[in-house]
Image (tube, rainbow, N blue to C red):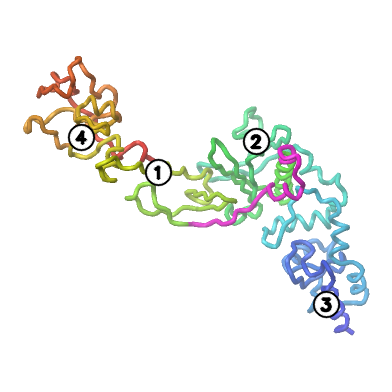
Amino acid sequence: MAKERRKAVLELLQRPGNARCADCGAPDPDWASYTLGVFICLSCSGIHRNIPHVSKVKSVRLDTWEDVQVEFMASRGNAIARATFESRVPPFYYRPSASDCQLLREQWIRAKYERQEFAHPERQEPYSAGYREGFLWKRGRDNGQFLSRKFVLTEREGALKYFNRSDAKEPKAVMKIEHLNATFQPAKIGHPHGLQVTYLKDNSTRNIFVYHEDGKEMVDWFNALRAARFHYLQVAFPGASDADLVPKLSRNYLQEGYMEKTGPKQTEGFRKRWFTMDDRRLMYFKDPLAGAAAPCSTPVPPRTPSPAGKSSSAAERAATRCWPGSRRPPRATTGHTGSPLSRQSAGFCWPARRSRSSGRGWRRSGRWWTGPCCPKSTQWKPTSSTSPSTRRSRRPEDSGLPRRGCRRPRLTGPELQP
């Protein structure tokens, strides 16, 4: 008889809707709640065991079944239970999958069967009212310690704010719902209720890491943020359906991990950085709990075509404003001689004074070049209408040139600075 009853329970798994877990959607469930009449996976069965006053579970293949239990399972099933316990789930409420963290799956199961929030809409007020205020533990940017901070979510203003003190009038930060994303990161934060909130500030990606000791409070905050995002998108895209807006409420990162990254200079070595693939953006941080993404290097400008009669390397040197070498700088692109006036008009460097040993020759020390990168007090200024190219005085005080130029810059140009 026991084998026949077990065989009858196994046949119930072939019915539509029973081939997947009733709570997380995992395939091939091997457990069942004989008080709720649903088939669930091994992971969700552990959560059901924590609410024995609501759900009692058995193994489909290993435990012994009674006739009354088999009849109840046959009269229910996942499809009927879903229509009963999930009849009024808000479209913005997050439905966890098998890959989500333990907290999301546990609160989803408790909300369905224990609190029955989706059968009584009045119990959804903590995350659907459009306004939420409370205290969360936030990780400090400098010391890394978690401190209690006051958070306020206002759907009318479309922002999430937090304050350093409970009596503070001005918020420490204002995060617009338009660019906000929230995702649970318990392993990264080091707390089972850890939540990472990402937002934009001055076109830069910022992160804050928060948690609450009560798991229900943390999940309510998460769904309140999704509800605010949902209402914002409904106004921004009035013709879109709920099925189109729900995937845009929050998103998990596609990939995260350490990689070795080189610096903006070719001479710098590789450094360990934390990379995050968020939608179609690849960002990197100094560490997993960094508050802001590392600043990107200035994009390398496209190479200009080489002037006639010059090689590409000569053209690149001619495009360099500051000449750091000890030899004579290249001629101006206008084709004039390397006089201070022509170089000043073309935006290149010139020597501050001539060498006494070589007469008209150029001093070979690169410390004495001056140009547009130098302070205005050291730049060359014409003292008369006489062309500087025709002035051959050896003394700097007679030629109108400064006695000393500025020291050479470390880089070859401001456009190559990070």
Mark 3 or 1: the one toward you: 1
Secondary structure under the numbered disc 1 in the rendered image: loop
Say which of marks 1 and 4 sits in front: 1
Q: Name the residue that disc number 4 marks.
A: 367
Q: Position of residue 14 (x, y in %)?
A: 82, 74
In depth, the one of 166 and 93 nearer the eye is 93
- The crowd level at tag 2 (other Cα within 10 Å; few <14, some 14-19, many 20+) is some
Q: Residue at x 27, y 34 (%)?
A: 333
Can you say whether 238 is above or below 15 in the image?
above
Query: Which one is in front in this view, the residue at disc 2 or the one at disc 3?
Result: 3
Q: Amino acid at mark 4?
A: Arg
Please, is residue 185 above or below residue 230 in the view? below
Earlier in the chain: of badge 4 and badge 2, it is: 2
Q: Which residue is mark 1?
A: 300
How far apart marks 3 and 1 lie (CA) works out to 64 Å
Region in magenta: 233-258
Read off the residue under disc 3.
Answer: 10
Q: Earlier in the sequence, mark 1 or mark 2?
A: 2
- Left or right, residue 247 beside residue 262: right
Instruction: Nearest to the eye among marks 4 and 2: give it.
Output: 4
Q: Real-space Cα distance between discs 4 and 2?
A: 52 Å
Q: Which residue in the protein does label 2 denote?
A: 161
Question: How far separated are the C-alphas under marks 1 and 4?
Answer: 27 Å
Is residue 240 magenta-colored? yes
- Residue type at mark 3 is Leu
Between residues 140 and 250, which one lies in front from this camera angle?
250
* Residue 237 on the magenta span: yes
Q: Could you tell which of marks 3 and 1 lies nearer the N-terminus? A: 3
Please state the horizontal and vertical placement of residue 412, each as a whole percent of the image: 30, 39
Q: Please identify the quarter of the rendering in which residue 84 is found.
A: bottom right
